[in-house]
Amino acid sequence: MSFIRQSHRSYEVTATQINPRQILAQIVQHKEQEIAQMRQQLTLGDLQRQLKAAPPVRDFLHALQNSPNYPSLIAEVKKASPSKGIIRQDFDPVEIATGYVRGGAACLSVLTDSKFFQGSFENLQNIRPTVAVPLLCKEFVIHPYQIYKARVAGADAVLLIAAILSDQKLQEFLYLIHSLGMNALVEVHTLAECDRVLKLADLRLMGINNRNLETFNVDLATTSQLMQERSQPLTSLGLTVVSESGLYSSADLAFVASAGVRSVLVGESLIKQPDVEQAVRSLLDNKTS
């Protein structure tokens, strides 16, 4: 599947045999099996006992809010995706992570899903001692086990996806993540999901995914629309908002920043570049171009 650049705000799917909702359902179904296997190999109790040896938690939210760059950047360590296949053949997660940080990334996002994104918790664990910035565990979280596993591996924040979690699960996982000293990036992609998430207690960090999960289309107007339509609660709650997906240029960053977001999460456009350090510098140095 490929995306054709239409403007600095929109990318349309031209041809695909992939049904996004089916892919999401497949991922969740596989996660259930994966977690059951992991719990057979290491019980939840044994995993929790490993928390004592986990690296200290770094303040993910503080790093985003206090970055000298506006918007601050979460650069993603990502080898593949269900829609694009392999994005980078010469994939060295540690080398990529350190390049991102040298370029000026405030935080990193590390894909830990193995089947669909060819990531791993091992990648997260290997990256942790090599960089000083906070790390986000990018995972399809459906069970507390994954949250504990993320913390043991050195995560400072965990992604929660509203599209795959009930309100009750979102709140339970949010509390658990905060109790472990981490932050939760709660991701929405529609106004309805945004309204659900804004009702959560102790919400601090919300992500707006510009990718439509029904069609795979990506439109940066999603960020501006949600920011405008829910400006009052977003402001009153003092939330830090992250724009995700479809960010390819400095103009894209300037566009979402003008909508009011504090941070952006960028993966594919950086990971495809031969020199990821320079790619980050170029993205951050010319936001008004």
Image (tube, rainbow, N blue to C red):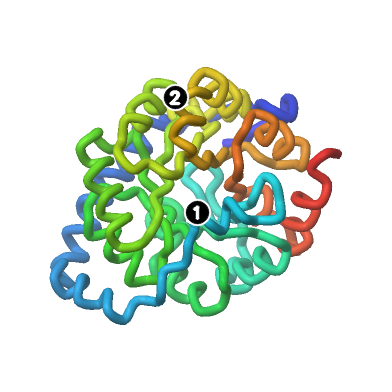
List the single residue furthest toward the right. Answer: 289
Q: Quadrant of residue 228?
A: top right
Residue that extends furthest to the top in the rendered view of this protein? 229
- Disc 2 versus disc 1: nearer the observer: 1
The quarter of the rendered structure image containing the N terminus is top right
Determine the residue positioned at 62% across, 59% down.
Answer: 106
Q: CA distance from mark 2 to mark 1?
A: 23 Å
Which x, y percent locates residue 45? 13, 70
Q: Tell me if label 2 and label 1 are in contact, CB under 8 Å.
A: no
**Camera sees residue 53:** yes
Q: Residue at x 20, y 54 (%)?
A: 33
Residue marked by disc 2: 190
Residue type at mark 1 is Leu
The residue that appears at 77% across and 57% down in the rendered structure is 281
Which residue corresponds to mark 1? Answer: 61
Residue 197, picture quadrant: top left
**Can you say whether 241 is above or below 153 in the image?**
above
Q: Residues within 10 Å of mark 1 (few under 14, many from 20)?
A: many
Decide if residue 201 is on the left or right side of residue 42.
right
Q: Nearer the viewer, residue 30 or 180?
A: 180
Q: Nearer the viewer, residue 199 or 98?
A: 199
Quarter that holds the C terminus: top right
